[in-house]
Amino acid sequence: MRDVMVGDKLDQYQLDELLARSGMASIFKATDTLTGNTVALKVPYLQFESDVVFHERFNREEKIGTRLDHPFVVKVLTPKYKTRMYLAMEFARGKSLRALIDEQKRLKVDTAIGIAVQVCEALVYIHSKGVIHRDLKPENVLIDPDGNVKILDFGIAMDEAARRLTWTGFSATLGTPTYMAPEQINGRRGDVRTDIYALGTMLFEMVTGELPFTDSDMHTLMRAKTTESPFAPSHFMADIDPGLEEVILHAIERSPKERYPAAETMLADLRNPSAVKPRDRSQIRASAGAWERIPQSIRTGAIVFAVISLLCILIFSTARRSPHPPSSQQPQTSVQ
């Protein structure tokens, strides 16, 4: 057995085009030869198929997908039979939210809110089914030509009704640091508020063209997310509606206890953000001095430099103040 490629036939599906590759699977555009429909197939690399935990995780993704039925969530299909591990899904046309942000930098505010509302509606639904996505990011949100959303990739989703699975091979892929909630970075499983944090981060990026934490070093970024307050959207966009800013900041609170408790609550505010009353957030970075706006890596270097400079000054000053050693004197002798 080998990894499949374009031109192969996999059970009832003819593989027509390679759409993408991830760390663990290839995504193909395919034709269902029984129905003539165009579908998408997610086929794991052969090296993972023999891993028991990966196999169970993949099966869980399929089971989650087949019981979710919402217009803003990609639909998982059930093949007539399967001779190897893969996932068959509806083929959703459009472009990823990531591509849209890359093209436009900042989305129109109404467009950004419209996308966030649809994603939040999908979260209300999937959370009601006991599912937490845990990897929401612009790459996993598809926008079709009519502006409708499709949430993709439930590869690391958590089913609250299922038993916990662990596998060290997933440690580097459980979420994307830019959109991960602080509790995920700290190694916790997360809950509905984890998805809310990711949505808040995406809305921040859609509206401002920037991110709440901007350090390019991944480890510094992860440390900042667990110990520091984020930039405020108004730091990048002075004319942002204060109510919309409050919605975003409420969603990306560092502590889960301070975030929206459920997607329904956030959805209500997203539908009328101008009516949201801003809270006192005098401690956020946008209200702090210029020092707080400098990336953490630069601040750390500046502190180290300052400490070393101070030590050098103290040593030099001490050396100047110390008395010169007494000059040697010849001992006096007396001759009797």
Image (tube, rainbow, N blue to C red):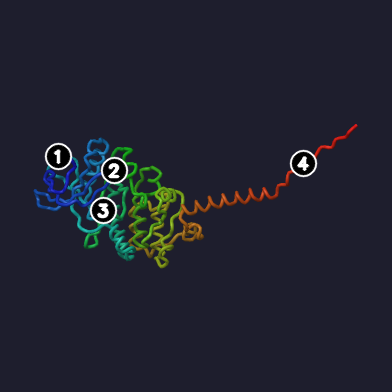
- First along the sequence among labels 1 and 4: 1
Please, which residue is most extreme toward the top here?
A: 336
**Is disc 4 placed on a helix, strand or loop?**
loop
Give percent across and percent down for residue 189.
Answer: 35, 43
Q: Are marks 3 and 1 in contact (CB under 8 Å)?
A: no
Q: Is 203 left or right of 332, judged from the image as shown?
A: left
Residue ID for mark 1: 83
Q: Nearer the viewer, residue 136 or 211?
A: 211
Disc 4 crowd, CA 10 A, few/some/many (<14, 14-19, 20+): few
Give percent across and percent down for residue 291.
Answer: 51, 58
Q: Nearer the viewer, mark 1 or mark 4?
A: 4
Q: At label 1, which amino acid type do we have?
A: Thr
Q: Are marks 3 and 2 in contact (CB under 8 Å)?
A: no
- First along the sequence among labels 3 and 1: 1
Q: Is 264 left or right of 231, judged from the image as shown?
A: left
- First along the sequence among labels 4 and 3: 3
Identity of the residue drawn at 48% across and 54% down: 298
- First along the sequence among labels 4 and 2: 2
Looking at the image, how many numbered discs can be counted on the residues?
A: 4
Q: Are marks 1 and 2 in contact (CB under 8 Å)?
A: no
Residue ID for mark 2: 159
Q: Nearer the viewer, residue 285 or 328?
A: 328
Q: Is residue 143 above or below residue 175?
A: below
**Is disc 1 placed on a helix, strand or loop?**
loop
Give percent across and percent down for residue 55.
Answer: 24, 38
Q: At label 3, which amino acid type do we have?
A: Ile
Identity of the residue drawn at 46% across and 52% down: 297
Please, which residue is most extreme toward the left here?
A: 34
Residue ID for mark 3: 151
Give percent across and percent down for residue 195.
Answer: 34, 51
Separation of residues labelled 4 and 2 (CA atoms): 85 Å
Q: Residue 328: which numbered mark, if any?
A: 4
